[in-house]
Amino acid sequence: MSTDTGTVDWAAALAEIEARIAKLQTTADGIREIMASSGVSPAGGPSGGGIKPDSFLKMSIPDATKKYLGMVRQKQHTQDVMTALEKGGLPPSKYNTVYSILMRREKQIGDIINMKGDWALAEWYPNYRKGNAKGKDAAGESAETKDEEKATA
């Protein structure tokens, strides 16, 4: 067995291999990104698999939830959202806290909606309307107000 290293340019061979590895890593990262955006984990099936320990660092609960829902691309129950946010680096929160924050977000901004206990992005359901509040019509007037107007006319 000869150890003559004079005929092979090992530095060039190593540089070529490292370049190939870098190219393959870039390709793999791109495929992971495509999979995450379509809601598929690398193991197959719906994902929380794209969540890294730092996915939601420095984010508010509503912003992290919006990002998470965008990753999985399907409605999620509050407990599933909480689990994902913790996995992504947010500190643990109580169920009532997360639910209240998301309900406030739904009422004030409307980009996250609650559909019978599951959270979704409003952009997925452009025709979804929250049930009208106790007798109010689309103009926001209550049935009582209309009755009073008729009585005074």
Image (cartoon, rainbow, N blue to C red):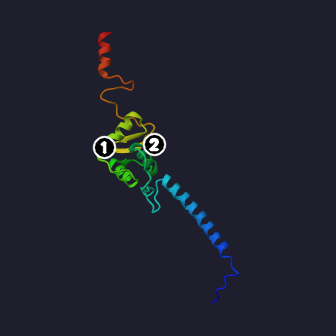
Disc 1 crowd rating (10 Å Cα; few below 14, some 14-19, many 20+) is: few
The residues tagged by marks 2 and 1 sit, at their Cα atoms, a distance apart of 25 Å
The answer to whether residue 153 is left or right of residue 37 is left
Disc 2 crowd rating (10 Å Cα; few below 14, some 14-19, many 20+) is: some
First in sequence: mark 2 or mark 1? 1
**Residue at (32% x, 18% y) in the render:** 146
Give the percent coordinates (x, y) of residue 14.
63, 72
Instruction: Give 45 or 53, whichever is nearer the viewer.
Output: 53
**Residue at (37% x, 34% y) in the render:** 107
Please, what secondary structure does the residue beneath circle 1 have? helix
Instruction: Give 14 or 22, whichever is nearer the viewer.
Output: 14
Label 2 sits on residue: 124
The answer to whether residue 3 is left or right of residue 83 is right
Label 1 sits on residue: 97
The answer to whether residue 9 is left or right of residue 81 is right
Does 59 sit above or below residue 32?
above
Type of amino acid under label 2: Trp
Instruction: Give 84 or 12, whichever is nearer the viewer.
Output: 12
Give the farthest residue toward the bottom: 1
Give the percent coordinates (x, y) of residue 96.
28, 44
Give the farthest residue toward the right: 7
Image quadrant in which you'd find residue 99:
top left
Does 61 sit above or below residue 84?
above
**Residue at (58% x, 60% y) in the render:** 26
Please, what secondary structure does the residue beneath circle 2 have? helix
Q: How many marks?
A: 2
